[in-house]
Image (cartoon, rainbow, N blue to C red):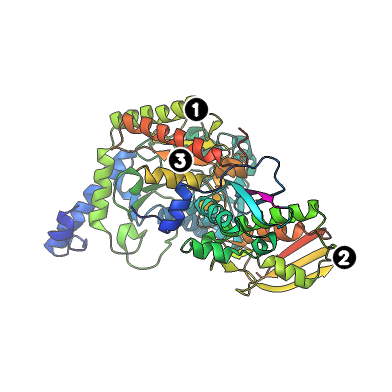
């Protein structure tokens, strides 16, 4: 990234621009090619954005605007989508579009029969994530894309948490739009990407210049794009296997060594870096603070932790009650974690949970 | 390390005072917030002659602010008469803790309500309660002073979030000056219903948003 901050710091120009701009443009295109090859896509099908939020806004609003007169005003999203898709869908709903919030089962898998039934002549887009941001469940995108293909329906998937961690090839799956972000794979923050299959009807979301094949206006952040492509390159299958082994250790150790713990999400079909467990009778923000004091950064679906004071819509979406969300803790494993960290985290959890249960009116000793 | 809480809050959170249960308490209160899911239980032992709270303990199923407030409020109440203890406010607790983030004010309210519920329980059991007060608009507004506006950390009455209240045939109607899709609308609504629904002569609570 560094040379594009200090040496080749120009804005990417057209091929008729000045030489430093051409160099910058070439770096951008190399980054794009690396991104595209990871998806088995053509590089003209990948645009850089400021992150998942912009990518998903572009996908949903872009398709809906392009097709609202020609086809209809209805979209389908799963009810456990992350906020970029969920709240874009809610905003569209307020603007008069029809939205079906598709149910998921107790492990977070989208209701495929419900999907088939929800698609009407008015439907223009289905958006179902690949891997869940909280509980890690990985959807059966093959089955979902087959349903969409059969009904000639455009499909968007938010792959923010699964990109590079879980296989995804646009050659093998008829997915039309894919949201990606660098921040989940040790890349820089503030850069994302959107895959748009060739000939997908999509209206530009932000008006301005003609960058990114006239799909996304604005000067490209070249150091960040180069950093994103590098981050993609650095993820290896070996690393994903290692994360998966640590994830399994966290889950198995928590379930076997701490009483009254429930796994959230699927045991098998889950992101390699994600473990999410509910520690009953205790509250998540208290846990995260105790963990922070011991040097572990974890997250929770507790209402106390959220900016809206609402319990996790994902835990609620899989049929969990307030209590299940209240004590839910997400452990995300990264490249720099070792197996000892997984062990140490659960040992710390064991002590913290025991202490908090001692003062909880719900934990009857 | 950077934490969102004052040193005082962190100390009480790490080593809370007066935690646990009292066997055969003279008064016991359990308060919960459906909006955030937190719960607080408070147990008291009261001297029958002096009405002084001689022992007090609490339990918390809640976040750091909730635990810290439970700790500090039980410290303050210990040794006070029940009439003095009734007057302890969440503001006092929050000041004692060196301030709480505004969005967390409702957590400290919950601990204060737990204490008041324990005192009320004691009074009811010992025949100290005066007759039941019928719910009027004034009672409604008084109760709503215990619902926090998470935008400011002050209550929804003081921050003029309540446009109108009415009471008729056991139905309380409250008009809140927020759009229904506001990030805090569901939490505030649940809190209002919980606070007013608990009144003895209220059968139904309607919460209406302005847009």
> Of circles 3 and 1, which is in front?
1
For the residues beneath circles 1 and 2, the answer to whether they share a chain is no
Q: Quadrant of residue A186?
A: top left
Quickly name the residue at label 1.
A255
Q: Quadrant of the C terminus of chain A?
A: top right
Q: Is residue A62 left or right of residue B37?
A: left
Residue placed furthest toward the right: B169
Q: Residue furthest front?
A: B49
Residue behind mark 3: A330
Q: Nearer the viewer, residue A279 or A212?
A: A279
Q: Position of residue B41 (x, y in %)?
A: 64, 48
Give the mark, 3 or 1, whose residue is nearer the N terminus: 1
Q: Look at the image and tell me whether residue A44 can be seen.
A: yes
In the image, B76 versus A72, the foreground residue is B76
Q: Element at badge 2?
A: loop
Regarding mark 1 in the picture, which secondary structure is present there? helix
Q: Is residue A165 above or below residue B124?
A: above
Give residue B169's mark.
2
Where in the figure is residue B121, as x and y percent of width and height?
Answer: 75, 52
Region in magenta:
B40-47
Please state the horizontal and vertical placement of residue A216, each as a whole percent of the image.
Answer: 36, 60
């Amino acid at each position: 990234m560094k040379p594009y901050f200090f040496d080749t710091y120009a804005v990417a120009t057209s091929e008729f621009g000045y030489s430093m701009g051409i160099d910058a443009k070439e770096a951008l295109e190399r980054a794009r090619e690396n991104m595209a090859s990871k998806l088995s896509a053509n590089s003209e099908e990948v645009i850089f954005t400021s992150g998942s939020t912009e990518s998903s806004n572009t996908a949903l609003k872009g398709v809906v605007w392009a097709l609202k007169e020609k086809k209809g005003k209805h979209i389908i999203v799963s009810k456990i989508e992350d906020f970029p898709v969920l709240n874009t869908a809610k905003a569209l709903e307020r603007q008069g579009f029809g939205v079906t919030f598709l149910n998921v089962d107790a492990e977070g898998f989208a209701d495929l029969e419900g999907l088939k039934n929800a698609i009407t002549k008015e439907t223009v887009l289905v958006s179902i994530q690949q891997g869940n941001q909280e509980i890690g469940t990985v959807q059966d995108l093959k089955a979902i894309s087959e349903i969409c293909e059969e009904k000639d329906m455009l499909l968007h998937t938010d792959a923010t948490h699964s990109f590079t961690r879980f296989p995804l090839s646009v050659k093998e799956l008829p997915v039309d739009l894919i949201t990606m972000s660098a921040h989940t794979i040790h890349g820089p923050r503030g850069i994302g990407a959107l895959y748009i299959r060739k000939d997908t009807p999509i209206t530009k979301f932000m008006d301005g210049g003609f960058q990114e094949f006239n799909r996304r206006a604005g000067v490209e952040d070249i150091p960040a794009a180069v950093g994103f492509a590098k981050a993609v390159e650095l993820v290896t299958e070996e690393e994903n296997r290692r994360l998966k082994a640590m994830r399994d250790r966290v889950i198995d150790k928590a379930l076997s060594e701490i009483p009254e713990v429930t796994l959230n999400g699927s045991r098998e079909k889950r992101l390699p870096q994600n473990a999410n467990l509910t520690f009953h009778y205790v509250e998540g923000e208290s846990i995260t603070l105790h963990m922070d004091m011991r040097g572990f950064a974890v997250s929770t679906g507790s209402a106390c932790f959220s900016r809206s004071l609402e319990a996790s819509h994902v835990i609620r979406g899989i049929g969990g009650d307030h209590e299940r969300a209240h004590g839910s803790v997400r452990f995300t494993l990264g490249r720099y974690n070792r197996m000892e960290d997984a062990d140490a985290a659960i040992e710390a959890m064991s002590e913290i949970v025991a202490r908090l249960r001692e003062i909880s009116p719900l934990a009857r000793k | 390390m950077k934490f969102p809480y004052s040193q005082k809050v962190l100390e009480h959170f790490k080593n809370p005072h007066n935690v646990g249960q009292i066997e055969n308490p003279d008064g016991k209160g359990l308060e919960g917030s459906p909006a955030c899911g937190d719960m607080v239980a408070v147990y008291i032992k009261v001297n029958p002659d002096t009405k002084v709270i001689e022992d007090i303990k609490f339990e918390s199923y809640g976040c750091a602010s909730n635990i810290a407030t439970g700790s500090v409020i039980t410290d303050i109440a210990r040794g006070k008469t029940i009439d003095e203890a009734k007057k302890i406010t969440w503001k006092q607790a929050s000041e004692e803790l060196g301030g709480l983030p505004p969005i967390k004010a409702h957590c400290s309210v919950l601990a204060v309500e737990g204490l008041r519920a324990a005192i009320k329980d004691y009074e009811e059991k010992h025949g100290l309660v005066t007759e039941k007060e019928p719910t009027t608009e004034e009672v409604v507004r008084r109760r709503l002073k215990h619902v926090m506006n998470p935008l400011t950390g002050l209550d929804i009455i003081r921050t003029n979030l309540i446009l109108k209240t009415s009471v008729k045939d056991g139905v309380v109607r409250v008009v809140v000056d927020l759009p229904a899709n506001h990030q805090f609308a569901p939490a505030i609504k649940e809190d209002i219903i919980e606070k007013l629904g608990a009144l003895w002569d209220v059968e139904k609570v309607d919460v209406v948003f302005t847009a």
